[in-house]
Amino acid sequence: MTTRVLLYGFLCVVLLIGCGDWRQAQFQPKTFSFTEQATLDSLVSVVLDTVSVQNARIDLGERSCDNCTDEQQDLWESVLDRDAKKAGYPEALDKTYQMGLDDAVRDIQQGKLRILYYGGVVFWETHDGETWNPNKVHADILLEQFGVEKERITGSVVNTWQVTYLTAYNRVSEAVINLYYEQEDVMQSTWDMVADAIDERGQRNRRRWK
């Protein structure tokens, strides 16, 4: 009986190891050589000139509400302050934007290419009834082909500070990634691959389980 249980357990482990990518493949971040890292660092300097706070073409918001009384204005500002502190960002949105720039630069200088996003977990269902997480598949493609990590920072409910930080961070990261790989839009081109990747993985998995 004991031998049978041990054999069953061994077979389960073998199946899990062999089929670890049945739903989602696993890839490792790219390790850049000294020369490649030097190229990334030089690109950061070029990109920062166009995405600085002074040149940022985004609405950083205003600490006011339309047609508010003084009491309502104070309440509105207290809500904004609370949200900023809760999220761990500076109260001034331009400083939050600068934080996003600085963090992106630091990560790139440490050899880490990363894209941030927010939103709920969404699944696609194929005509065969299989369900896939498109963001996870997209993340696999980015990591496999470009060594770029894709990280979800929060769900669908976000505040102005989170959006501002994410916008700044991604403006640096995406620009450097596009310049480094000499592509117009790596994010869009990899998103265009998601549907075919899901179809190919589905066929591979069906063949495996026949």
Image (cartoon, rainbow, N blue to C red):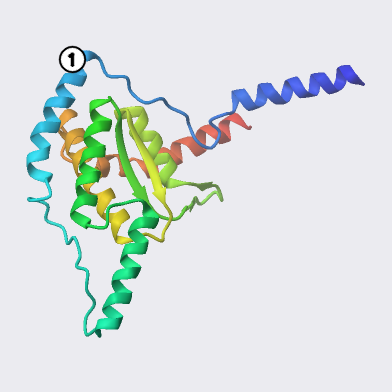
- The residue nearer to you, when weighing 40 against 139, is 40
* Residue depicted at 72% across the width and 26% down the height: 12
Q: In the figure, is residue 1 to the left or right of 171?
A: right
- Residue 158 x/y as whole percent: 37, 59
Q: How many marks?
A: 1
* Residue depicted at 20% across the width and 42% down the height: 101
As drawn, the residue found furthest toward the top would be 34
**Quarter assignment of residue 41:** top left
* On-image quarter of the N terminus: top right
- The residue nearer to you, when weighing 157 against 144, is 157
* Residue depicted at 48% across the width and 52% down the height: 123
**Quarter assignment of residue 181:** top left
- The residue nearer to you, when weighing 195 against 1, is 1
Q: In this view, does 112 lie above or below 186?
A: above
- Residue 157 x/y as whole percent: 41, 61
Q: What residue type is labelled 1?
A: Thr
Q: Is residue 63 above or below residue 198?
A: below
* Helix, strand or loop under label 1: helix
Residue beneath disc 1: 35
- Residue 99 x/y as whole percent: 24, 45
* On-image quarter of the C terminus: top right
Q: In the figure, is residue 20 to the left or right of 51?
A: right
Q: In this view, does 150 lie above or below 8?
A: below
* Residue depicted at 33% across the width and 34% down the height: 142
Q: In the figure, is residue 8 to the left or right of 176?
A: right
